Image (cartoon, grey):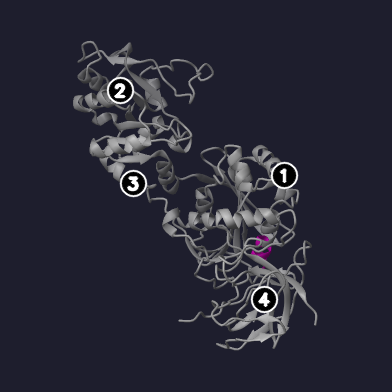
Amino acid sequence: MASINFSCSSTSLARSRLLGGLHYGTMQCVNGVEFLRQSSSKVGLSVKASGKIKAALFSGEDGLLPHSTSSTVASNALINDVSDGVEVQSDAVVLGALSADVAPTTSGFPVDNDEFDLDLPSEGFSSIPEAIEDIRQGKMVVVVDDEDRENEGDLIMAASKVTPEAMAFFVKHGTGIVCVSMKEEDLERLQLPLMVTHKENEEKLRTAFTVSVDAKHGTTTGVSARDRATTVLALASKDSKPEDFNRPGHIFPLKYREGGVLKRAGHTEAAVDLSLLAGLDPAGVLCEVVDDDGSMARLPRLRQFAQQENLKIVSIADLIRYRRKRDRLVEHASAARIPTMWGPFTAHCYRSILDGIEHIAMVKGDIGDGQDILVRVHSECLTGDIFGSARCDCGNQLALAMQQIEAAGRGVLIYLRGHEGRGIGLGHKLRAYNLQDDGRDTVEANEELGLPVDSREYGIGAQMLRDLGVRTMKLMTNNPAKYFGLKGYGLTVAGRVPLVTPITKDNKRYLETKRAKMGHVYGLDTNGNPAIISKNGRPTVESPATPEA
């Protein structure tokens, strides 16, 4: 009996200790139905389906094999037998074929959606909407930055709402250095130059201090809580003029970086962003919180302080996510027809408003009403996509996704640049490769370099899809962060289409690490169903079987 090499996921992730839950074996035909003949572990494959069954086929390290044979399983026919060494179990989940028209509604990821909800605050923090409401009401909030940055908390409130009592609270619980974050146009209007130029700025985080000021009118020495509150209100007023201030003084204006926390994840930017989100003038008061002994207050103490003073405490990371979901991040630049090796597509170029990076969307067919569009959001990988590196599966996934979209006749591939090495950049990725050659896995290598395991963000991709008219999609991915991340931007993911590509000696450990440490799933679901994606060497699609009630 002829056989071909095949790989599929095991029936139990807990039992699977092989390659990413994948097991090698041979596909054989038993009673007209194709099964997996196991060769590396005892794996059962159950079939209860109606319709044709196809499989992703591999030949060792040589890639996809052509396979035209298909078999029909009688509707609701449950096979429970052991034939010719093939174990078939009766308690498995239904095996259904993937379809370009109808996709499974289950993602197969053992992850709660809430973990990727962009509006859900990080553990131990208040929500951004709660903080915005307090800012609107003239209250202050505690804002914490990343532990790898300053790892400090600032008291922040809208400059236009400051009072002598609030200023006294700033001075009592803060360093005493009270700052006002302002937009560049307001600093120029008031003729407040930077204390030093950007080139001369040797402060660790390049905080853009201007010359300090006191209000000329309504103040005495300028240092009291009342005097400082008067100065802050004067800075926030659109009616103030350069001659209304003495220089130097006791209040330190700061230059806000346009784009806010999306450009610079600092307290300076958070102060203005929160004021703007609250519908107030773009100026915010901020002062670093100190402990009772005068040292900088860190997160445990900041949480205790916020609870004692009945203040909301939020993170800049949460503010970034909040803004990314709501702000316009890209603009459409141009479009043209591109004949590709898979077929003709229309290429749409989008330019990031934040950093100018250009991304591309390859569109096949008519998006129409935007419902049930086959979509792949692909992260740039120069080594894999262009040079065919065998270290990863990126190039193979890109090719397979384009094939699937061409076969479906309708779909979108989003190609996101700036995602090299899961966001660490090409140079760092090559350094990580050297560490992997010394025995680390892909996660350990990033951590040893002091870099994030995965810093990719999918807001730009989501906005590109929405601009193209996509509303619901069948997402081609094995990555739970991508699946739930896109859902967090308001797009409906109707189902997941796994991308199963050849496993080689070079990418074997990489794929296993992504499964074991990053939650990737190589198959239709976590119960062991193989990905059903290929016919005649090209991906095909069939209607899924109806699951049991």
Measured as percent of width and height from the top left, residue 542 is found at 61, 76
- In the rendered structure, which amino acid carries the disc numbered 4? Lys
Disc nearest the viewer among 2 and 1: 1
Identify residue type, mark 2: Leu
Which residue is at a point 33% across and 46% down the rendered structure image?
Answer: 127
Which residue lies at the image location 67% right of the left edge and 48% below the top edge? 381
- Could you tell me which quadrant the C terminus lies in? bottom left
**Real-space CA distance between mark 1 and mark 3, rounded to the nearest whole angstrom:** 43 Å
**Quick one: label 4 or label 1, which is nearer the N terminus?**
4
Of residues 36 and 203, the one drawn nearer to the viewer in this rendering: 36
Q: For the residue marked with disc 3, what is the amino acid?
A: Ser
The residue to which callout 4 is attached is: 54
Query: Circle 3 — which element?
Result: loop
Q: Which residues are magenta?
A: 401-407
Residue 278 in the image: above or below residue 181:
below
Q: SS for tag 2?
A: helix
Q: Foreground: 71 or 163?
A: 71
Q: Is residue 417 visible?
A: no
Question: N-terminal of the two: label 3 or label 4?
Answer: 4
Q: Nearer the viewer, mark 4 or mark 1?
A: 1
* Residue that label 3 marks: 127
Distance CA(mark 2)–CA(mark 1): 57 Å
Q: What main secondary structure does the magenta stretch of the protein show?
A: helix
Which residue carries the number 1 mark?
437
Q: Against 187, is 506 above or below?
A: below
Question: Picture coordinates of residue 2 (x, y %)?
Answer: 80, 80
Along the viewing direction, whichever of 123 and 206 lies nearer the viewer: 123
Q: Reading the chain from its start, which is encountered first: label 2 or label 1?
A: 2
Q: Amino acid at mark 1?
A: Asp
| Drawn side of residue 473 relative to residue 512, left or right | left
Q: Nearer the viewer, mark 3 or mark 2?
A: 3
